[in-house]
Image: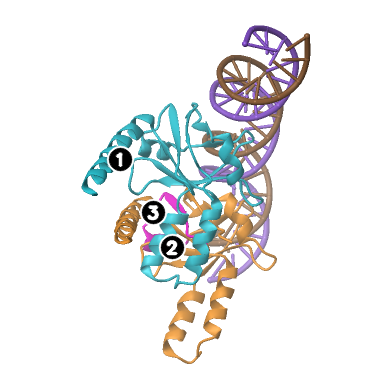
Chain colours: A cyan, B orange, C brown, D purple
Amino acid sequence: MSDFIGRYLNKVDKKGRVSVPASWRSSLISKEFSGIIAQSSLSEKSIDAYPREYLELLQNKLDSNDPLLEENEYESTVLFGGSVLPFDSEGRVILSNSLRAESYIEAEALFVGMGRRFRIWSPKTFDEYLARAKLYMDKRRKNKS
Amino acid sequence: MSDFIGRYLNKVDKKGRVSVPASWRSSLISKEFSGIIAQSSLSEKSIDAYPREYLELLQNKLDSNDPLLEENEYESTVLFGGSVLPFDSEGRVILSNSLRAESYIEAEALFVGMGRRFRIWSPKTFDEYLARAKLYMDKRRKNKS
DNA sequence: TGACGAACCATATATTCCCATGATATTACT
DNA sequence: AGTAATATCATGGGAATATATGGTTCGTCA
């Protein structure tokens, strides 16, 4: 079930193209669509990414709700209103200018697995995040007893 | 399943024409009708849009209710009273003056997927909406435990 | 006959595909 | 084990194609 594991650093070329880690691709390929769904992360300066199947699951959940309720509209917009990034023939995707700008990604993109989904970071921003995460984990470890 | 995913920014020419994202068109083409059903959103300053099939779904839902109830009458009028916007030969639709005025759309139209339907926004108005939506989603994320 | 809308045509732009190269890892062989 | 042969993957550039966009013409209806 955990499709996206590990950390991969790839280059972004001047067209904005970047290779998606080869070992992840099989989880991102289906008959209907091959590629990733991406959007600026709500909580971090990074790109949230997931397979399209993930959205089908959400769709099922949303179908049983009232589509005209405001909260369901918010959800639909945020989840489905991201970017669709199809693979090119060598398994790359194009990160649009806005996606790159909002995540501070320039020449290098760091793919970080999160199980069912993954994130794409600028290496530097990720380092800062990691430092914060470690601090949090440390505090948590000491409080617990 | 989820036909309308992603976000596309297209230009509106002086005749009010705008291209519908090519990847969405196949979901909007059928033998009976090719184009979109659109109307000013009830809740937001945007245009609600969907394929004609979407109306069949709603029809089924309404059929299970009492047609003589006042609220069902309202619903039918609003949902089925939208504008019919057929494609021209290159996959564009014409946004009427009133549709544009009510959604503050001028030179640019932003198509935002919502799964089974989509909305057309002025970019600026959408930014404001997205901020609100993110706030809601963030609150929701934190409440969950 | 003039305004309007619909179809048609032309071009610019963006996207996708295709091929070439280099790097790295893996396997095979002596 | 050491070295050669092979395969996989990342990367880069250019050509071909699809799409978006803008303009013009034609017909219709008021």
Left or right, residue B27 beside residue A103 = right
> Is there any visible trace of residue B117 in the rendered image?
no
Q: Residue A19 location, x and y as percent?
A: 54, 32
> Is there any visible trace of residue B141 in the rendered image?
yes
Q: Nearer the viewer, residue B50 or B133?
A: B133
Answer few, some or many: residues within 10 Å of disc 1's Cα (few below 14, many 20 plus, some between 14 and 19). Answer: few
**Residue under pointer 3:** B122
**Residue under pointer 1:** A133
Q: Chain of mark 3?
A: B
Q: Chain of mark 2?
A: B
Circles 3, 2 touching at the beta carbon (< 8 Å): no
**Residue under pointer 2:** B47
Q: Residue C9 location, x and y as percent?
A: 67, 43
Residue type marked 1: Ala
**Numbered mark located on residue A84 in the image:** none
Give, as a single range, the part of the protein colored magenta: B96-115
Q: Residue B25 location, x and y as percent?
A: 60, 55
